[in-house]
Image (tube, grey):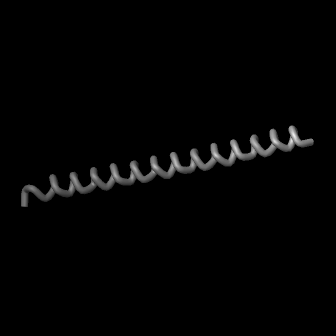
Amino acid sequence: MSDLPVIAFIVVLATGVVVWLVALVLALVGLARGAVSLWQTIAAQASAARLG
């Protein structure tokens, strides 16, 4: 039973790493979506300015 604290620590550490990775991926996806929408807005305004 002496290995139980070590196992619990490894499980908690792994869970924390997974949570951080998921948060990082979500943040990157959000930034990418924001950049794409911003670029689309700028492109639409530029094309509208060229057409008008």
Classify residue 6 as left or right of residue 39.
left
- Looking at the image, how many numbered discs can be counted on the residues? 0
In this view of the protein, which residue sits in the foreground, 28 or 5? 28
Classify residue 21 as left or right of residue 14.
right
The relative height of residue 29 versus residue 50 in the rendered view (above or below) is below
Q: Residue 5's quadrant in the figure?
A: bottom left
- The residue sitting at the front extreme is 51
Q: Position of residue 48 (x, y in %)?
A: 85, 44
Residue pictured at 42% horizontal, 53% vertical: 22
Classify residue 46 as left or right of residue 37.
right
- The quarter of the rendered structure image containing the N terminus is bottom left
- The residue sitting at the bottom extreme is 1
Residue pictured at 75% horizontal, 42% vertical: 43
Q: Position of residue 32 (x, y in %)?
A: 57, 46
Classify residue 16 as left or right of residue 28.
left
Q: Position of residue 44 (x, y in %)?
A: 78, 45
- The residue sitting at the left extreme is 1
Residue pictured at 57% horizontal, 50% vertical: 30
Residue pictured at 16% horizontal, 56% vertical: 7
Q: Position of residue 52 (x, y in %)?
A: 92, 42
